Image (tube, rainbow, N blue to C red):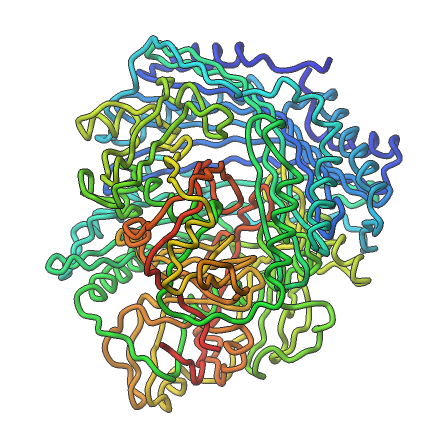
Amino acid sequence: MPTDPYDLVEKAIDEGQKLEADYIEARLVSTNANTSILKNGVPELGGIIRSKGIGIRVLKDGGVGFASFNEMTKDEMNIAVAFATKMAEASGKRREKKILFSEEDIHEAKFQAIGKSGKRPLEVNPEEKINRLMDIDKLLAELKTDAIIPFRFFQMNDQTIEKYILTNEGAKIESEIDLIQLFGIIVAVNPTTGSKEQLMVQKGKAGGFESLDYWNIEDYLVKEATTLGKIVTESKEAPTGTIDYVVGPNVIGIMCHENTGHPSEADRILGREGAQAGESYLNEEMIGEKIGSEHVTIIDDPTLEGSYGYYLYDDEGVKASPRYLHRKGVFDEMLHNRESAAFMGTNSTAAARAIGFNREPIPRMANTYLEPGNFEFDELIEDVKLGVLMHNFTEWNIDDRRYQSKYVGLEAYLIENGEVKHLVRRPVVETTTPKLWGSVDAVAKKDLLEFDAATCGKGDPMQGAPVYHGGSFMRIRNVEVR
Amino acid sequence: MPEKVNIKKIVQATVDKLVTLGFDDHSILAERSNTSQIRFADNQITIVKNWASLELAVFAVKDNKTVVIQLENLSDDIINSSLESLKILANSLPPNQNYLGISDGPFSYPTIDNMFDSEFLDFHDKALDNVQAAINAAEAEGAKRSAGVLLWEAKENKLVSSKGAVASENTSRFEFSIRSFVDAKSSGASVEVGRLSSKVDFERAGMEAGKIAKMSIGGQNGKPGKYNVVLSPKVAADIVAASPGAANPFMVEIGLSWLKDKIGENIAPEFVTVYDDALLPNGLGSRSFDEEGHPTGRNIIVENGILKGFIHNTSTARKAGTTSTGNAGLVMPQNSNIYFEPGEHSFEEILEISKDKPTLYITNNWYTRFTSYADGIFSTIPRDGMFLIENGQISKPVRELRISDNMNTIFKNIKALGKDIKQIKSWEVATPTYIPHVLLEDINISSATS
């Protein structure tokens, strides 16, 4: 007989205690999601996803076991708890260095981030969703530019995620989050030369369909597509040599995420992700070491209201607060869950996130950004003799120790003698993390702070986590460009 | 035995409800799987996991409006209410002009050998020992610590369609990856995968990872420039197999393929022939039917260097004036296994062929990203052991380089294929790929400026 899933969560804790688990957590996750796909103006697909399951994690004898199930019966629950406990024991016995979880305050709490009334994912008529996408596509298809836009793909996803987490220590966390996401691919082509440029769009936010208006989504996409057309028809060769870069929120955001967020994940530093996402150029002994200039303060804050990576308590029940990964250029804090924190003799920084009932909580970023500085935008530009203003990027990658990165500009302009001039094509920043942050000599004010949404990949099986990243504008001096 | 939801009953109830709701076409796939995983790092087990999962995927059509539903919540009331929501969703959509039907059955299906491991249940007791054997093998080669993952799964599925397809399959899979380190920068990696545990050589993987890690000790930063590159099967499966992987009409239509309008063109040297082959025994992508219930097969993508065709579902095939290749996924055509016909050369012969040009041997990579998919412009980062080849021999380890080139160039500049074909599926390579060592000519290598 199917059993009430909330009862199963509670019974799982009891069952784990009977089996003498040192720690057991049971996490019920219910996801209601909808999707609409539009391909070159044609409604390719409407989709519905409904998921509900329970994940059980056990610490016993210095080992960890995890099991999940989605057939809501007492038998399935008992099997999962027994498996997780048995595997924790079996693996723990083989470990020389026992796994422990850090001691943390215990919380009972509820939090939510939901859309405005009438605008929540399940409240909006599917017809309204697809019509909005089709209207957006029509705007782009009929756009008057010197380029054509033959490839247009949009996917709009909305979801409501409800979680109920219990631990044998007494933590009890309930949450309800609405997320909305718009993913798009737009390719502009120069009809004369065949030259192409792509824009990958990803907008995301905690909330409902009011987010589309918050983003001014139609104006935003028309502006971006118009610029894309100009890039393939008007842009000139990017400068080389030793030049300065002024980069915008989109570029700062990805740099904060890749060059600082990932290497600050404590499980990577401990080697736990060694075979997949890799390790880190940072290590425990480098806490307090100078990585960048005094202008570089990089914060990861899960508590930003309305953000794509929003939460108030993590998936181990630890209360979240802003993490200062770099403070005035110094490596200050790591992203910890309770396991990594115990290994390093410190406390969790509430970074444990699991994407789905069938995934384990591991240290993740939430909303990572460069703290704004005191400069006006014009001040960043005015004393640049030769440089590039890079608003956003296309290709990027970084080695798995997060040391050697590459960012290719999309909307980018020549800066010459303190003036922003014409578009330049695909300027490249290919440099190391310390060189990048060490060369920042100015950061713009808070009124230019913006965030982008992204899906951060990590773990095995892959866990795609919703995150924000951003900043205002910053200037990077003396970047060598070949 | 624990009570289980009956898959057949769920599928039948779904069919009945879809008919009642007035849907015209449908394809329903129900899957029950049991998956276990061991993760390890620093030579020790970090976690052991198990997922018991029951899922239902439905593709349905009403008045040419196409909708899908994916359920991991299979109580009767959720199935009913979700399908009713699906009808509301279908009614709210405009017709999909790209939908041209699903495949007409009934069908008979091919039999594929080595799809399910008869000793699967016994493997649970051997799993920890197999992981330990790989770690020990890496240590014996000189590695100080190893990290990795072993995953094993048993799955049963059942599919029915409104066009008479009725199919089911039982499969198993085993995926093992190991990455070994001598120090933070000296590392090597290996994978072993298959549908039978007897085909997964854990010790070989450990030995390879440990050996490469030891060989990469003391590597210095390499110099950017044009190189010939020898790619391990792991790297080749990512960036050489990317081109046959881009032979997908859905990807072409959204600007994510560099093969638009290239059917019939010479895109590789004459000795390159590639299939999408769903019938390979032990192949992780092997399957006897696709998600429309159409029988799968062996479809040529590149023959003697010429792009011969794309993979298709029924709708994309009819639009292109051809027939389905049995590659339907829920949303778009999906590869089964990408299979490269092996070449004639041993690894040593490949090094010898390239002895007169600056040459790199790249054993692993990650983070492949594109400036322009439609043009094929990309870069990717070597990870783990990378070596300079001099006089046809591995001479010294190098580091901190990046392949920054074009997928069209990569495929066109294949200089030689090894005869040592290997099945690859990894964190970086989602489509199971059978590919040997590959020699590429004149590839652009970049590096950080400081």
> In front here: B369 or A198?
B369
Residue situated in front as seen by the camera: A210 or B289: B289
Image position, residue B445 (x, y; %): 39, 65
Q: Which residue is rendered at x = 43% and y = 74% of the image?
A: A448
Side (left or right) of A228 relative to A277 = left
Q: Position of residue B273 (x, y in %)?
A: 31, 36
- Picture quarter containing residue A368? bottom right
Q: Is residue B374 at least partly visible in the picture?
A: yes
Compared to residue B340, the image places residue A476 above or below, namely below
User: What residue is drawn where x is 52% and y is 35%?
Assistant: A32
Write down the quadrant of residue B77 in the picture: top right
Q: Locate residue A182, reporting x and y percent.
A: 39, 48
Residue beneath the point at 32% across and 49% down:
B414
- Between B426 and A15, which is closer to the camera in this rendering? B426
With B113 as the anchor, is A156 left or right in this view? left
| Image quadrant occupied by the N terminus of chain B | top right
**Residue A163 shown left or right of residue B435 in the figure:** right
